[in-house]
């Protein structure tokens, strides 16, 4: 039976729904990484794979230990070195290999983790192999392959940049773009991508130094305080657009020329329109906390909107089932069929820049076509008895005129003039509220009413 970080008790904490994640040294170390590499090869029947890692101080040694475990189990490992998560997905698709990415995304510096995928960037989650890998590690029996695999290096950064620009070429007027990498992996990928746009794009870099201690601000752009520097820089530089990436650069948030944050729902609608122009009638996926403007616009443009639960495994599975061309989440994840159904913050950013370069309109004016309803943003509340609160909300709103309710993910309540969703966090005692309305007063009223119920403690 395994012990230490590979004990069943610890493994139950660090093996999450979609990845492995924990505090380095306490919950995640080289022993666990090595055992996970061997179990991954054994459980999934892998004979070759690709491995990348982010800028966190612990990432190279953890990735190396994982590679050692994988080779001991008989697989050949291709190391791509420093990479964003979407660069690892590119490598998995481009090289047709399963992959492992060492990153804790937007989490604080003391964390690290492993994101696993099958060949062509197909996700590995708890229901698609991760539970078996966890149990194989917990068994503690060494995995020994019939042969020892090899380790080689392969740089895919320039091929990644070329592929993204082929999917979303930027042409037209010259743009000035401020990019806040937050000391994360966009500081590695943005120079390669924007370097190919010399003469077309003037890039103003913020915090491009790779530093997993995040000395300037957390690399988590969904939190408003982490966007302040970007907003100030966009205004000071008189830039056309600002881009903020999270630590592993798979998510991107936009700031317009006024320094105002752009809702990810608005960017979802813009990209959906661009993709539908390429393939009229195609299917577009959106999660259930995305603004109702998204399915409205997709329908108006002749596409088919399909609603799904929150979470990349649900988005990717539904994209595969429906052959959807694109999928967007309100959390800033954007998925592309032409990118092996994987998410790429950089590709989403290029779509926004391409649309902007094609017009003389400022970004705020361009996006006004896609932002129809005021949104509350996600509001978290600590709640001990989540089920009781959800039941009370259902009782309160279920009997009202013109109200429809569904429970695809938490509680979604819809009225012609407003809508909201309340759902429980998978990892914390939180309820998450997202609300919208036909106008600002309507949204504010619904938001405040629902919050009062959530936080009443009754």
Image (tube, rainbow, N blue to C red):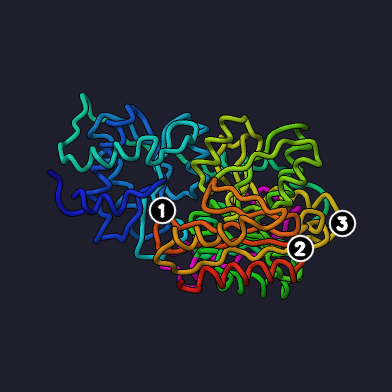
Q: Are marks 1 and 3 in contact (CB under 8 Å)?
A: no
Answer few, some or many: residues within 10 Å of disc 2's Cα (few below 14, many 20 plus, some between 14 and 19). many
> Is 199 one of the magenta-colored residues?
yes
- The residue that label 2 is drawn on is 240
Q: Nearer the viewer, residue 345 or 78?
A: 345
Q: Looking at the rendering, in which quadrant would you find the N terminus?
A: top left
Going by the image, does 272 lie left or right of 60? right
Q: Residue furthest left?
A: 1
- Kindly report the distance in space between the C-alpha atoms of the residues bearing marks 1 and 3: 39 Å
In this view, the residue farthest toward the front is: 399
Residue 103 circle label: 1
When asked about the image quadrant of residue 129, the answer is top left
Q: Could you tell me residue 203's position as x and y percent?
A: 67, 61
Q: CA distance from mark 2 to mark 3?
A: 11 Å
Residue 130 percent location from the top left of the image: 34, 40
The reply to whether the magenta stretch includes residue 185 is no
Q: SS class of the residue under badge 2?
A: loop
Give the mark, 2 or 1, whose residue is nearer the N terminus: 1
Q: Is residue 156 above or below residue 415?
A: above
From the image, tell me which residue sits under label 3: 360
Q: Position of residue 20 (x, y in %)?
A: 35, 49
């Amino acid at each position: 039976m395994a012990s230490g970080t590979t004990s069943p008790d610890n493994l139950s904490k660090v093996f999450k729904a979609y990845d492995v994640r924990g505090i380095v040294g306490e919950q995640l170390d080289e022993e666990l990484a090595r055992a996970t590499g061997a179990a991954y090869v054994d459980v999934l029947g892998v004979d070759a794979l690709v491995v990348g890692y982010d800028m966190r101080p612990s990432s190279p040694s953890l990735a190396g230990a994982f590679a050692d475990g994988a080779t001991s189990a008989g697989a050949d490992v291709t190391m791509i070195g420093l990479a964003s998560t979407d660069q690892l997905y590119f490598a998995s698709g481009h090289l047709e290999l399963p992959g492992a990415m060492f990153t804790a995304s937007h989490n604080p510096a003391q964390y690290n983790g492993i994101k696993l995928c099958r060949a062509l960037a197909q996700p590995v989650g708890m229901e698609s192999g991760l539970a078996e890998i966890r149990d194989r590690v917990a068994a503690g029996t060494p995995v020994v392959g019939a042969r020892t695999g090899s380790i080689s290096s392969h740089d895919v950064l320039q091929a990644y940049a070329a592929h993204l620009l082929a999917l979303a070429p930027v042409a037209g007027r010259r743009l000035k773009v401020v990019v806040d990498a937050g000391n994360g992996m966009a500081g590695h990928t943005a120079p390669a991508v924007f370097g190919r746009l010399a003469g077309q794009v003037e890039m103003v870099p913020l915090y491009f130094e790779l530093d997993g201690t995040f000395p300037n601000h957390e690399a988590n752009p969904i939190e408003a305080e982490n966007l302040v520097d970007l907003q100030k820089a966009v205004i000071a530089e008189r830039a056309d657009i600002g881009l903020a990436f999270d630590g592993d650069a798979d998510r991107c948030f936009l700031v317009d020329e006024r320094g105002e944050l752009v809702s990810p729902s608005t960017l979802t609608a813009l990209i959906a329109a661009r993709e539908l122009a390429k393939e009229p009638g195609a299917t577009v996926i959106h999660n259930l906390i995305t603004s109702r403007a998204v399915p409205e616009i997709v329908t108006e443009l002749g596409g088919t909107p399909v609603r799904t639960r929150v979470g990349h495994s649900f988005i990717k599975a539904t994209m595969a089932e429906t052959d959807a061309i694109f999928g967007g989440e309100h959390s800033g994840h954007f998925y592309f069929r032409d990118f092996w159904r994987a998410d790429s913050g950089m590709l989403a950013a290029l779509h926004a820049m391409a649309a902007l370069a094609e017009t003389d309109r400022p970004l705020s004016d361009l996006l006004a076509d896609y932002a129809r309803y005021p949104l509350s943003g996600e509001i978290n509340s600590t709640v001990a008895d989540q089920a009781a609160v959800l039941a009370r909300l259902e009782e309160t709103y279920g009997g009202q005129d013109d109200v429809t309710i569904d429970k695809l993910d938490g509680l979604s309540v819809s009225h012609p003039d407003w809508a909201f969703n309340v759902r429980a966090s998978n990892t914390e005692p939180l309820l998450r509220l997202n609300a919208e309305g036909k106008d600002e007063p309507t949204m504010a009223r619904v938001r405040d009413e629902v919050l009062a119920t959530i936080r009443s403690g009754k």
